[in-house]
Image (cartoon, helix red, strand yellow):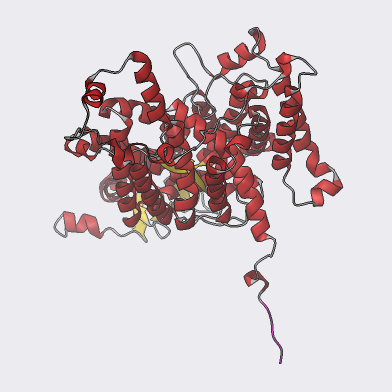
């Protein structure tokens, strides 16, 4: 008996190991980003880590994408800041996150993910290149030890006076901004990442270069702590990852605890009553605030449902998060060397569930995010297990390994992100887009520059507008052409309509018809046409029935359905 085995159905035994290593690398990149985005959003750092955990453990299994990684997004920082202030607190804001999740679930159910098919390839490539440029520019200060700003702040303007380039200038020209220990870690990390694949033994090993860089960074920072090179070389806490330590159930539960009820009963002593009634001092208030900020889970205040502003906030979050997710899916599908499609509608359903959970436990809103997804692809991801694994590592980081995670220098993570940025903004991509002509290059470069100098969503909107403008220009210039092999000098001029003729084509069509000389025989062929604007169809009919006879032109139409005009005119 002859048997055959379909090789495509036999899973590579190394797939799990590939996903494990990819998930580990994504975790190392996601950890500071989750914390940084939370700090930039003005919420407790735990809210960012919870969003990353939800992205891995909730959205990961539900998503149909093999490469996408979800978590808190820098593109939502401004929205979070504004809506927390508008609604009067983070506990009220997360109700909007919960409602946004319900809206996203409804959008997925209604197949709204099909909108992703309308994103031009040039704009998506511009988005990827822009993220690469931003990663490089934003990580340069961290590479040299200037770690004043949150890692997640990807917008061009940080304040009225500070922007991406001014931060780089401060790093190089302000005294004391370059930290020698962090800089050495960054330089050695870059060298390891560059030469790892060039050394045959290391290239054949399954050990990821990014993990080697993190281990190197931890070892070096312990070495600098010994003081042999002086105190200025020591990499202190402000130059390392800062994971909130989960010490007890009190830290985890926060205001979900039942012990928060302080209503006195009959057994309350006068001393306790006096303590409850006495206003806290300023220092005590600060201690209480610090204790509250350490709590991981925040209880949503559903009393805000009576405020119409919460629904506006929810709609804003749902629309922006969904758009960013759809854009990211299109981008990572283009990066994926295996070209596996990501089902957009299923992703919206998964994101909806994730944001519902985020709203219930006190996490930042979650989207599919481009930086972690691109790192995932470049780390050799095989399946969506890597996204789930990165979520498991985030849980372990805060429960078991927080102390070790807090020894990772930010400069070695900056090196990993800079190398990822160079892959996204590869000079070969710019050359390729240039060779494709201005209709592809201009939307690409405009999208790139707009994202770098504003933020992701504003830049994409500008890029989409430029791409749409080019589409409109093309459509306005192409409506009809002489059929191959015919010219104005032939006995009968054969004009062929394009497949789609919109109202934008009326001007170019009119110019073509006006150029026909008196005494010419002309055939307008609509055999290839699938759509024609009614007003344009009426213009052709007017030319054939009135203008052509008046100018001694013999005109006729073939292959074009003129019945809508006959019905409109009562059959005459």
**Relative side of 313 to 213, left or right:** left
Nearest the camera: 171 or 275? 275
Whole-percent x and y of residue 70? 48, 45
**Relative side of 373 to 211, left or right:** left
Residue displayed at 41% across by 60% down = 527
Whole-percent x and y of residue 306? 16, 37
Quadrant location of the C terminus? bottom left
**Relative side of 11 to 560, left or right:** right
Residue 390 shows in this picture: yes
Q: Quadrant of residue 88?
A: top left
Q: Residue furthest left?
A: 570
**Relative side of 309 to 409, left or right:** left
Nearest the camera: 236 or 390? 236
Would you say the magenta stretch is mainly helix, strand or loop?
Answer: loop
Q: Residue furthest right?
A: 200
Q: Quadrant of residue 407?
A: top right
Q: Above or below — where is 211 with respect to 43?
A: below
Residue displayed at 69% across by 65% down = 13
Quadrant location of the N terminus? bottom right
Bounds of the magenta span?
Answer: 1-5
Nearest the camera: 154 or 548? 154
Q: Above or below — where is 25 with respect to 88?
A: below
As for residue 320 lying within the magenta part, the answer is no
Whole-percent x and y of residue 124? 52, 41
Nearest the camera: 121 or 233? 233
Count up the numbered dots.
Answer: 0
Residue displayed at 75% across by 34% down = 216
Residue 551 shows in this picture: no
Q: Above or below — where is 415 with respect to 166?
A: below
């Amino acid at each position: 008996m002859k048997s055959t085995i379909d090789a495509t159905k036999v899973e590579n035994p190394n797939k799990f190991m590939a996903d494990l290593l990819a998930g580990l690398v994504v975790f190392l990149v996601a950890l500071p980003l989750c914390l940084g985005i939370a700090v930039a959003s003005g919420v407790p750092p735990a809210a960012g880590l919870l969003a990353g955990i939800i992205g891995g453990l909730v959205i990961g299994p539900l998503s149909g994408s093999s490469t996408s990684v979800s978590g808190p997004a820098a593109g939502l920082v401004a929205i979070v800041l504004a809506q927390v202030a508008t609604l009067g607190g983070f506990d009220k804001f997360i109700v909007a996150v919960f409602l946004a999740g319900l809206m996203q679930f409804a959008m997925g159910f209604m197949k709204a993910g099909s909108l992703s098919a309308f994103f031009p390839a040039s704009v998506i490539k511009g988005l990827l290149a822009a993220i690469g440029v931003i990663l490089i520019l934003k990580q340069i200060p961290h590479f040299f030890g200037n770690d004043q700003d949150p890692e997640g702040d990807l917008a061009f303007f940080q304040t009225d006076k500070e922007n991406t380039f001014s931060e780089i200038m401060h790093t190089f020209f302000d005294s004391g901004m370059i930290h020698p220990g962090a800089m050495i870690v960054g330089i050695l990390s870059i060298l390891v990442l560059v030469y790892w694949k060039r050394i045959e033994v290391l290239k054949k090993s399954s050990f990821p270069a990014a993990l080697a860089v993190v281990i190197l960074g931890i070892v070096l920072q312990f070495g600098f702590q010994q003081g042999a090179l002086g105190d200025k070389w020591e990499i202190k806490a402000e130059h390392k990852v800062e994971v909130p330590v989960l010490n007890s159930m009190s830290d985890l539960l926060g205001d979900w605890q039942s012990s928060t009820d302080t209503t006195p009963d009959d057994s309350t002593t006068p001393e306790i009553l006096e303590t409850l009634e006495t206003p806290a001092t300023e220092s005590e208030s600060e201690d209480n605030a610090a204790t509250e900020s350490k709590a991981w889970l925040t209880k949503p205040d559903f009393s805000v449902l009576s405020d119409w502003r919460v629904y506006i906030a929810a709609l804003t979050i749902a629309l922006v998060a969904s758009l960013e997710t759809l854009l990211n899916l299109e981008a990572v599908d283009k990066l994926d060397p295996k070209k596996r499609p990501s089902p957009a509608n299923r992703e919206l359903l998964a994101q909806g569930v994730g944001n519902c959970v985020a709203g219930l436990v006190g996490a930042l809103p979650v989207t599919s995010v481009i930086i972690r997804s691109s790192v995932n692809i470049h780390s050799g991801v095989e399946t969506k297990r890597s996204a789930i694994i990165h979520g498991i590592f985030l849980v372990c980081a805060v429960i078991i390994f927080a102390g070790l995670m807090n020894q990772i220098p930010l400069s070695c993570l900056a090196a990993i992100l800079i190398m990822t940025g160079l892959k996204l903004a590869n000079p070969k991509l710019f050359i390729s887009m240039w060779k494709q002509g201005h209709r592809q290059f201009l939307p690409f470069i405009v999208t790139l520059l707009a994202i770098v100098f504003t933020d992701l969503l504003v830049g994409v909107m500008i890029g989409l507008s430029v791409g749409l403008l080019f589409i409109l220009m093309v459509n306005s210039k192409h409506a009809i052409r002489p059929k191959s092999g015919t010219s104005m000098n032939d006995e009968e001029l054969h004009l062929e309509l394009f497949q789609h003729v919109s109202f934008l084509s009326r001007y170019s069509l009119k110019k073509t018809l006006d150029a026909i000389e008196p005494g010419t025989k002309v055939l307008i062929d609509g055999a290839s046409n699938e759509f024609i604007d009614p007003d344009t169809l009426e213009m052709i009919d007017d030319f054939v029935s009135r203008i052509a006879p008046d100018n001694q032109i013999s005109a006729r139409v073939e292959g074009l359905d003129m019945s809508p005009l006959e019905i409109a005119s009562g059959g005459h």
